[in-house]
Amino acid sequence: MSAKTRTPGPIGIFDSGVGGLTVMRAIRKLLPGEDLVYLGDTARTPYGSKAGETVVRFTRECVSHLRQYRIKALVVACNTASAYTLPMLHRSFKIPILGVIQPGGQAALEKANSGPIGVIGTQATIRSQAYPVTIRKIKPQAVVYSQACPLLVPLVEEGWLNGPIPLSVIKTYLAPMLRKNIRSLILGCTHYPALKPALRKVCGRRVQIIDSAEEVAKALRSVLEAKGLLKPGSRRGRQVFLVSDVPAQFVRVGATLWGRKLEQVKRVSL
Ligand code: DGL
């Protein structure tokens, strides 16, 4: 797959770094024939501690780069970028564009069974109020508790996914919302699915954990179907991974999130 590829183009998937691979993995599972091109802005990650306007600027540059691949649709596989950039992206690029917040919010409402909903994410995502606003647009009386968890991304990046330290950090962050008896918990950051076993231990069985990756993949399939953009034929899809910094850390951490060794990783300048 090269930047000169002619139609049908690949699906572009964008994240601030490595976390969006959890979304790409769900897309690959549901749409095995599609060509995928992933861009992780590893030179400038994390986005979660940055100002909204910085996230908008970085995202615009990344999506412009992905457009060189003639992408037929874009998935913003980053909660922070989804929280701040979707209106700008819809105005600027005339292809189907999906974020992770709407599908995750919808699934949380369905699974919460009218009970309170918890949302965890980066500081920027929580500050944006994107989840409570989206959920209350669907169900105005929904009760939503939010918590920024800035230590969780570094834990995933270091591969500390279980054991006393991640468990104690997660317990401290979740204690207030667990006392409010939340019924579903949205993993509002694409790194967090890697911590699912530890989160499950802390939450117990009563809380439904919502990983928006699968919901996004389903929403993407519906949009491509509706627009006649699904790739015909039975050939297995290809994938390339683009990063904006040296690939070593991306390759190391990404293997856990993608589920196997990452091949075809290329460094690009934005
Ligand atoms: N991928 C980001 C998200 O889902 C987390 C990492 C970051 O802060 O850039 O919000």
Image: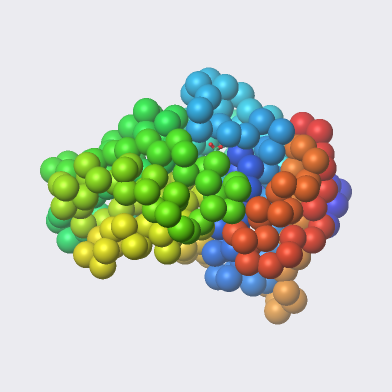
Q: Compared to 157, does 217 lie above or below?
A: below
Q: How is the rendered protein coloured?
A: rainbow
Residue 197 visible, this angle:
yes
Task: Give the x, y percent position of residue 123.
Answer: 42, 31
Task: Give the x, y percent position of residue 128.
Answer: 38, 29
Residue farthest front in this picture: 164
Q: Which of 176/9 is in front? A: 176
Q: Which of 81/229 is in front? A: 81
Residue found 56% across the figure and 57% down from its top: 22
Q: Is residue 53 left or right of residue 68?
A: left
Quarter of the picture containing the C terminus is top right
Q: Quadrant of residue 47?
A: top right
Residue found 42% across the figure and 64% down from its top: 197
Q: How many marks?
A: 0
Residue found 15% across the figure and 47% down from its top: 180
Q: Is residue 107 left or right of residue 238?
A: left
Residue found 75% across the figure and 43% down from its top: 243
Residue 37 visible, this angle:
no
Q: Compared to 231, does 120 lie above or below?
A: above
Q: Is residue 178 left or right of residue 18?
A: left
Task: Give the x, y percent position of residue 193.
Answer: 47, 57
Quarter of the picture containing the N terminus is bottom right
Q: Which of 91/133 is in front? A: 133
Q: Compared to 28, does 88 lie above or below?
A: above
Task: Give the x, y percent position of residue 256.
Answer: 62, 61
Q: Which of 255/224 is in front? A: 255
